[in-house]
Amino acid sequence: MNGQKKNYEKYLKSLDVMQEPKVPKAKLDMRGAILFARQHGIPVEKLSKEDKDRFIQYL
């Protein structure tokens, strides 16, 4: 019973420790993407990955 209690306490402590996300911070220039899509006559949702990457700035 004592081992179970220790494991449970360890589990509860591990829930309190929040790790930083490993996702890079980025900013999307949505206005620029919309204008680009309008100029080319395609919907914003159908922009290719390369086109979307033009409007992403990594901070």
Image (spheres, grey):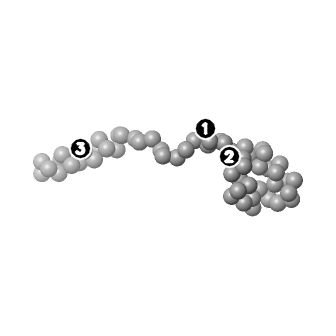
Mark before the other along the chain sequence, 3 or 2: 3
- The three-letter code of the residue at mark 3 reads Glu
Residue occupied by mark 2: 56
Quick one: quadrant of the C terminus? top right
Coordinates of residue 9 in the picture (x, y in percent): 23, 44
> According to the image, label 3 marks what residue?
9
Disc 2 crowd rating (10 Å Cα; few below 14, some 14-19, many 20+) is: some
Circle 1 residue? 59
User: Which callout, 3 or 2, points to the residue nearer the camera?
Assistant: 2
Whether residue 33 is situated above or below residue 42 in the rendered picture: above
In the picture, measured across the screen, residue 9 lies left or right of residue 54, that is left
Residue 15 appears in the rendering: yes
What percent of the width, then of the height, locates residue 27? 65, 42
Query: Which element type, helix, strand or loop, lies under badge 2?
Result: strand
Question: Crowdedness of circle 3 by 10 Å Cα count: few (<14), some, many (20+)?
Answer: few
Give the camera-side residue of 16 and 46: 46
Crowding at label 1, few (<14), some or many (≥20) Cα neighbours within 10 Å?
few
